[in-house]
Image: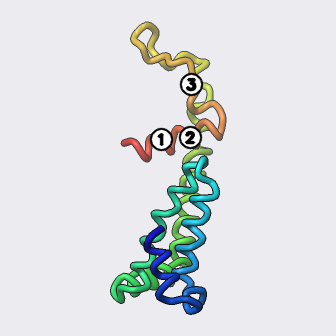
Amino acid sequence: TAEVSLNLFVYQLEFFKDSWLKFDLVSIVMSWAFAGITILRAFRMFRAFRLFARIGSLKKIISALLSTGNQMAAIMLVLALVFYIFAVMFTQMFADCYEEGCFAEGNGDDLGVNYFGRLDYTLFTLFMLMVCC
């Protein structure tokens, strides 16, 4: 708040020509206007993005990351396709495992959920295995 006030005092009309200063002003005004909504106050931390424009090395890194966006999207699409193929394969292989009693009775393996019974369950199960293990 004090920083935006001082910037407005120092830069006067030039204040509204700088995009980062306008971003600061909007983020602070929004946090005041919607003080009851805490998620909007969290957007004030995005003010740190100004460092990307002011520090040359950070600017180069961000521009390099953004220039590889198409290639990264293609890689993510291929990984999603492989993930989907494995989900379909596991659903086909293990969909009936729960009903057939593949789990041993009495030792706590029967959790009451057929994790591979439907494709959406299988996708979720595989995602949890990929992230957690």
Q: Is 1 on the left or on the right of 22, as rendered? A: left
Q: Local crowd at mark 1 within 10 Å, few (<14), some, or many (≥20)?
A: few
> What amino acid is found at the position of numbered circle 1 in the picture?
Met
Q: Amino acid at mark 2?
A: Phe
Q: Position of residue 57 (x, y in %)?
A: 33, 86
Secondary structure at badge 1 equals helix
Front residue (pair 49, 123): 49
- Does 56 appear above or below 129? below
Front one among 21 and 131: 21
Which is more foreground, mark 2 or mark 3?
2
Residue 64 appearing in the image: no
Mark 3: few/some/many CA within 10 Å (<14, 14-19, 20+): some
Q: Residue at x 50, y 56 (%)?
A: 42
Q: CA distance from mark 1 to mark 2?
A: 6 Å
User: Which residue position holds label 1?
Assistant: 128
Reply above or below: 94 against 15: above
Query: Which disc, if any, is residue 124?
Result: 2
- Please give the name of the residue rendered at 54% of the width and 52% of the height, measured from the top-left corner: 83
Please state the total of marks drawn on the protein image.
Answer: 3
Q: At which x and y percent is residue 46? A: 48, 67
Gap in Å between the C-alphas at discs 1 and 3? 19 Å
Name the mark on residue 75.
none
Q: Nearer the viewer, mark 1 or mark 3?
A: 1
Instruction: Find residue 122 and report its horizontal and vertical position in percent.
Output: 58, 38
Amino acid bearing label 3: Cys
Asked which secondary structure carries label 2, the reply is: helix
Residue 58 locus on image (x, y percent): 36, 82
How much space separates mark 2 and mark 3, taking CA atoms? Answer: 17 Å
The residue singled out by tag 3 in the image is 97
Does the residue at mark 1 contact the one at mark 2 (Cβ under 8 Å)? Answer: yes
Q: Are marks 2 and 3 in contact (CB under 8 Å)?
A: no
